[in-house]
Amino acid sequence: MSSNPQDQKQQSWVEAELEDSFDEELEMEIDDERISRELRQIKELRHKSELDRRTYFGELLRLQAELVKLQDWVVHTGYKLAIIFEGRDAAGKGGVIKRVTQRLNPRVCRVVALPAPSEKEKNQWYFQRYVPYLPGAGEIALFDRSWYNRAGVERVMEFATEDQVEEFFNDVPEFERMLARSGIKLIKYWFSITDQEQQLRFLMRVHDPIKQWKLSPMDLQSRVRWEDYTKVKEEMLERTNIKEAPWFIVEGNDKKRARLNCIHHLLQQVPYEEVPHEPVVLPDRVFNPEYERKVLPKELYVPDVY
């Protein structure tokens, strides 16, 4: 370590900036583990990931650095990448999506999470509402649920008729082959958790005011109709697992392992390579000796409460 006080000051500033950058992930981890006093009494909740924190954070940051390289390559080559995240409610899809997008440019990598279809959309070609969100050249689109709603929740909750479901199964393989022929790389992930794990995660949401918004009436019904969802999932995987867009199952009981495994697998599906960059040189600031900075009214500033 340098003995020069100026060097030490500079180093401490750099370290503080790095810590601030990593705190975002730490905040999400704390949020994942924050549970109510009542739930702490449930013995089954006292389990930890098989990965220690040091290994998890080290691997996550390494994989996120690779995701940045992937992003640069996608932009450089005009690649079109679409990734579908499906699975049980509370299976960890959102957590993986957060870690994928955390260090990426939102102008390149965007998340698509569509609400329930409007009356107009219900009477359109089923896939029509999803088409505008497909990636163009140099873009990555992450679908937090997708057109597979028809094979899952719409079927179980009887929002779609059996004829509509059968039509979907007949159409979706050709629709996805059309995407492949147009140059879109489609990757499909199904997140799987056990019955008990979903129940525990739902209990955490029930008892956590910050997370209760995640529990919709449809989510609660998914507990009641667990077996129905299992049956339709099995048929969906069997009938829509095509060569051009196969399904990949992510074991989600251990959140940390699921995140790392999914991101690692995703990186293996794209033939990206590091893109050469021109060296970035910070230009000198232009100083105007005649410029005098104005003093702004105090009421414009946010109060220093902290």
Image: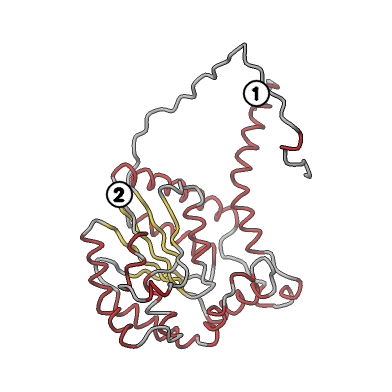
Q: Which disc, if any, is residue 137?
A: 2
**Tag 1 near tag 2, CB within 8 Å:** no
Q: Nearer the viewer, residue 242 or 11?
A: 242
Q: Amino acid at mark 1?
A: Asp
Quadrant in which the C terminus appears: top right
Q: Residue 42, image x and y in percent?
A: 70, 78
- Residue placed under numbered mark 1 in the picture: 7
Residue furthest front as drawn = 120
Q: Position of residue 271 (x, y in %)?
A: 29, 51
Against 78, residue 96 (above or below) is below
Which amino acid, mark 2?
Answer: Ala
The percent position of residue 30, horizontal first and vertical second, equals 66, 58
The kind of secondary structure element at disc 2 is loop
Task: Tell me which residue sits at (42%, 51%) in the image.
Answer: 109
Q: CA distance from mark 1 to mark 2?
A: 45 Å
Up/down of 239 relative to 98, above or below? below
Q: In this orientation, which residue lies closer to the viewer: 160 or 103?
A: 160
Badge 2: residue crowd in 10 Å (few <14, some 14–19, many ≥20): some
- Colour scheme: secondary structure
| Disc nearer the start of the sequence (1/2) | 1
